[in-house]
Image (cartoon, rainbow, N blue to C red):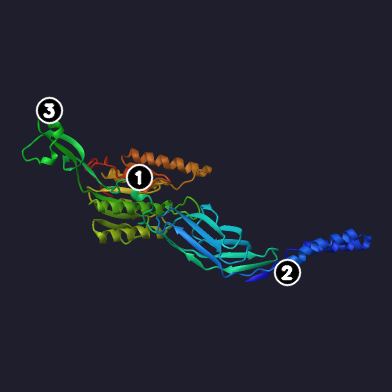
Amino acid sequence: MTERVSRWGGAVAAAAVLAATGAAAQRPVLLLAAAVPLVYVVYGSLSSVAAPESLAVTRHIEPTPVPPGYPVAVTLTVENEGSETLPDVRVVDAVPDELAVAEGSPRGAGALDPGESVEIEYTVPARRGEYRFGPPRVRLRSLGAGAVATVPASVAGDDLLDCQLAAEAPPLEEQGDRYVGTMSADDPGHGMEFHSTREYQPEDPADRIDWRHYAKRGELATVDYRKRLAATIVLVVDARPAARVVAGPGHPTAVELSAYAATHALSDLLAAGHEVGVAVVGDDGPGPAGLHWVPPGAGRDHRSRAERVFGRATETRFPEDIGHHQVGRLVQLAPPDAQIAFFSPLLDEGSRAAVERWRGAGYSCSVLSPDVLTDNTVSGQFAAVERRARLVGCQAAGARTVDWRRGTPLPVALSHAFAAADRLGSTPGPRAGGDD
């Protein structure tokens, strides 16, 4: 669509004033000066622009699929494949309303000679779901800027950003051991980590003989390793209203980040041979006390069922905080020897009270807390201080706490949350009951 733009009203007025003044004063110089703005008026009126069919638009989205919070780079390229110069090309990409531009700009402009292109680069933080980019808006202006053409641009390349809880963002697979749930016991036996040496027994296998000890002292000794045992872990995601906060417009909520971390912990723990249960507090589910609850288990179907529970936790929002009764009910549902891993931003006292209650009931606990607070305001700094105090409070209660800062790779955070220092059988004291 081409339209005329009235840009030279001031030039027409200037020409009229100069001509009238020159005629009244009988000054030929002023009459001649009046011709200068008239030249611009005529040039702008006669200039035109057409929407060339040779304008090629390509979009590239990398990476996708992607987990929540990961920066996604979008590159839009507009190339002049025709034989005529385009003096003024302006482009605005159609970013989905749910996403925010974190770096760069979806706008660009430039003059394009034949074969030249203008490239727009910007970054958006991913949120869970599928987001489809629309066709960008391309406008061409004539050399005199008196005509504007809006080009219906068809885009080649990518138009979909797919954000999944189970997606792996580079460089996840480059961060060492992905089996974050490898639990160790204090008892010696078969394994990978050195435990001790002892006197050789005739029934000991040859591959466990300490030959260096024999060469040094002439005595046979057997190497014992720390045994690897299967554990029962319950992954709990905090989906209460207090946890549904974001670091900024268009960013994922803390619930999305918690569910993302829990999903990868689930995958790695199951792959390591552990039995895993899942629960969501703060969401109205079909289980006991309104919980979304999947008892500890293993297998592909179990994993799919648990992932659906985490996915639902990111989609729903309930104004009433129903997590208190669910925390107490979880004490009755989790097996006595289970370890609880709590994924929460720790933005209210209810999250710390939950950890203290589970610890008081005799459960070993780990807390992985995604940091979604900003410290560029006084209120944000105060909230950050309160959150750090809750982390210290959970640690004082005997829980292993991990502050998952933005920019820290998830495997690093998970390896700390499920470190081997959380020995099996370390749960303290007798277990207490819980309330519905």
Please state if 330 lies on the left or on the right of 107 as rendered: left
Judged from this view, the residue extending furthest toward the top is: 217
Q: What residue type is labelled 2?
A: Leu
Q: Which residue is at a point 42% across and 43% down the rendered structure image? A: 387
- In percent of width and height, residue 197 lies at 15, 34
Q: Which residue is at a point 61% across and 68% down the rendered structure image? A: 150
Mark 1 element type? helix
The residue that mark 1 highlights is 412
Q: Which residue is at a point 62% across and 63% down the rendered structure image? A: 86
Of 56 and 82, nearer the camera is: 82
- In percent of width and height, residue 281 lies at 35, 54
Q: Which quadrant of the figure has residue 293?
A: bottom left
The residue that mark 2 highlights is 46
Please state if 223 lies on the left or on the right of 405 as rendered: left
Q: What residue type is labelled 3?
A: Arg
The residue that mark 3 highlights is 217
Examine the rendered structure and indicate whether residue 30 appears above or below residue 372: below
* Front label number (2 vs 3): 2
- Residue 390 visible in image: yes
* Front label number (1 vs 3): 3
Whether residues under marks 1 and 2 lie with C-beta atoms below 8 angstroms apart, the answer is no
